[in-house]
Image (cartoon, helix red, strand yellow):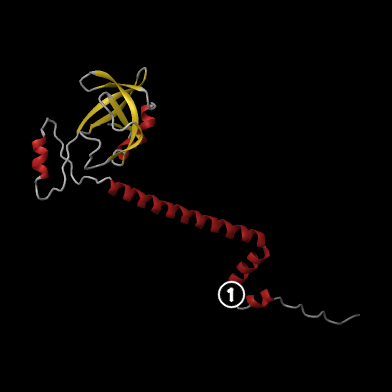
């Protein structure tokens, strides 16, 4: 009977390295090493997730910076006084003469319903700007089409175009709160940083 003993198995570098770990960690490392493909897929998945989160965060920072710059460039007003009665330019001038006030500007506004179908209406606010070429506060800029609009013509804030279901060149039918109706020519699009906040709530803006 052969009583020779088998030579001891040669330890690999991995086995020798695992001697310094606790049994729990030796099992973890061994499982990862023996399932290289699965380990690689997990590492790649985590890397893609981290990269995606970084891209989203970076894009958000860029967009927020662009919005902040666009808002500042519109020369936003710091206060708005609302009057439900008419007033003249003298009131505006007296406010502008106050030492605490750098600029004052008057605008008119009216809520109307804009017809988008046979029995469909869209709520809209029409802002009356005295001089489109000399806007001092809350600047409204031309986007496309005609600028400035003439009497009987209207501009629509670009983000509200989908609400109006209209295209530049169309005739829009409006109805005022008093029940008066009239047609206006849709001649162009405008860009209003302030109005975009309200378009999200379903309110169209026109000028």
Viewer-side residue, 158 vs 153: 153
Residue reaching furthest bottom? Answer: 4
Q: Position of residue 120 (x, y in %)?
A: 35, 21
**Quarter of the image where the N terminus is located:** bottom right
Q: Position of residue 45 (x, y in %)?
A: 57, 56
* 118 shown above or below 6: above
**Quarter of the image where the C terminus is located:** top left
Element carrying mark 1: loop
Q: Position of residue 168 (x, y in %)?
A: 38, 27
- Residue under numbered circle 1: 22
- Splitting the image into 4 quarters, where does residue 124 fall? top left
Viewer-side residue, 177 vs 44: 177
Q: Position of residue 57 (x, y in %)?
A: 43, 54
* 26 shown above or below 5: above
- Splitting the image into 4 quarters, where does residue 79 fall? top left
Viewer-side residue, 116 vs 202: 116
* 72 shown above or below 82: below
Residue, x 24% and y 45% (percent of image)?
76
Tell me if 28 is positioned left or right of 199 in this view: right
Residue, x 40% and y 51% (percent of image)?
60
Label tally: 1
Label 1: few (<14), some (14–19) or many (≥20) C-alpha neighbours in 10 Å = few
Tell me if 85 is positioned left or right of 110 in this view: left
Residue reaching furthest right? Answer: 1
Residue, x 34% and y 48% (percent of image)?
67
- Splitting the image into 4 quarters, where does residue 205 fall? top left
Tell me if 206 is positioned left or right of 22 in this view: left
């Amino acid at each position: 009977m052969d009583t020779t003993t088998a030579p001891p198995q040669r330890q690999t570098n991995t086995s020798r390295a695992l001697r310094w770990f606790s049994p729990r960690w030796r099992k973890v490392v061994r499982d990862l090493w023996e399932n290289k493909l699965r380990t690689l897929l997990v590492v790649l998945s985590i890397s893609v997730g981290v990269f995606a989160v970084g891209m989203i965060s970076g894009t958000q920072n860029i967009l927020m910076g662009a919005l902040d710059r666009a808002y500042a460039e519109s020369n936003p007003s710091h206060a708005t006084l609302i009057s439900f009665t008419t007033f003249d330019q003298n009131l505006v001038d007296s406010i502008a003469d106050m030492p605490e006030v750098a600029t004052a500007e008057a605008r008119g506004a009216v809520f109307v319903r804009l017809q988008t179908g046979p029995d469909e209406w869209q709520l809209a606010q029409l802002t009356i700007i005295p001089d489109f070429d000399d806007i001092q506060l809350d600047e409204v800029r031309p986007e496309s089409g005609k600028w400035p609009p003439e009497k009987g013509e209207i501009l629509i804030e670009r983000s509200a175009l989908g609400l109006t279901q209209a295209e530049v060149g169309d005739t829009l039918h409006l109805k005022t709160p008093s029940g008066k109706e009239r047609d206006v020519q849709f001649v162009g699009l405008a860009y209003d940083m302030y109005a975009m906040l309200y378009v999200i709530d379903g309110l169209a803006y026109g000028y």
